[in-house]
Image (cartoon, rainbow, N blue to C red):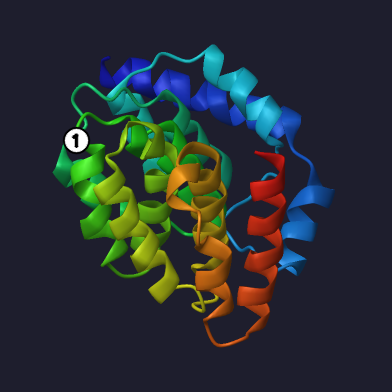
Amino acid sequence: MTKEEIAREVCGVRRQLVRSMNGVIAQRMRQSGVVYERNYGVDIPRLLCISTSLPHDKQLAEALWSLKIRETMLLAAMICPTDDFSVEDLRCWVKQIPTYEVAEMVSQKLFARLPYAVTQVSTLIDGNGFEPVCGFLMASKLLPQMSDELAVRFKENAFARLNEPNLYPAVLVFFRCLVRHKKHLCNNLLDELCSLKETRSVALLCEEVKTQLEFF
């Protein structure tokens, strides 16, 4: 795409966001501590709808990402193609993630779909900021195609990071997916959890895992 085409698409996106803005949602997010430089409060289904009308172009995705607006960052994750998204691009984007919501979207819609995704999970989990969040969310998405040996390694890492408040939601997602896709690795999971020092996070995870094991 040319610079003029990208600028035209970005202007079009801004107009759609203004028409779809929801101040109530944006205010509730701020009150709950989810803060963006700018937030129009547009819901995810509407953003998914907008994304279907946009070219899936890396330069356009980068332009939207660089605006640092909640909605444009989420849209960037939705439309960015994976064929020429390099490891360097991943490392750059992940350091700019402002919230768990963006980490979740970019991990599911982009990072986990990259051809080298599995090889980057360990590096991200050992990183800082939202890097480990993305690492566990990517691992959750990639579990069906992951070797048992690698899944066990990530399970052990998840145990070690369980009581980190900022990481807990992603770890919870990982354990939920582990039970769903690798149940044969979870025979002693409840016993292993019970052996940990009792905390609110461990208690919540025990209940979640117990429900998952019964359901699946």
Between 28 and 153, which is closer to the camera in this rendering? 153
Q: Can residue 93 be spotted in the picture?
A: no
Vertical placement of residue 29 versus 86, above or below: below
- Please state the horizontal and vertical placement of residue 97, each as a whole percent of the image: 41, 55
In the picture, measured across the screen, residue 31 lies left or right of residue 201, that is right
Q: How many labels does the image show?
A: 1
- Please state the horizontal and vertical placement of residue 34, each as a whole percent of the image: 64, 63
Between 150 and 174, which is closer to the camera in this rendering? 150
- Please state the horizontal and vertical placement of residue 100, each as a whole percent of the image: 53, 57
Please, what secondary structure does the residue beneath circle 1 have? Answer: loop
- Quarter occupied by residue 144: top left
In the picture, measured across the screen, residue 150 lies left or right of residue 44, that is left
- Rendered-image quadrant of the C terminus: top right
Q: Residue at x 38, y 45 (%)?
A: 138
- Please state the horizontal and vertical placement of residue 83, each as a whole percent of the image: 21, 21
Q: Residue at x 76, y 68 (%)?
A: 31
* Residue most extreme to the bottom: 197
Q: Which residue is drawn at 25% across and 45% down?
A: 90
Vertical placement of residue 31 versus 66, above or below: below
Q: Residue at x 33, y 55 (%)?
A: 152
Residue type at mark 1 is: Tyr
- Rendered-image quadrant of the N terminus: top left
In the picture, measured across the screen, residue 124 lies left or right of residue 10, that is left
Between 215 and 128, which is closer to the camera in this rendering? 215
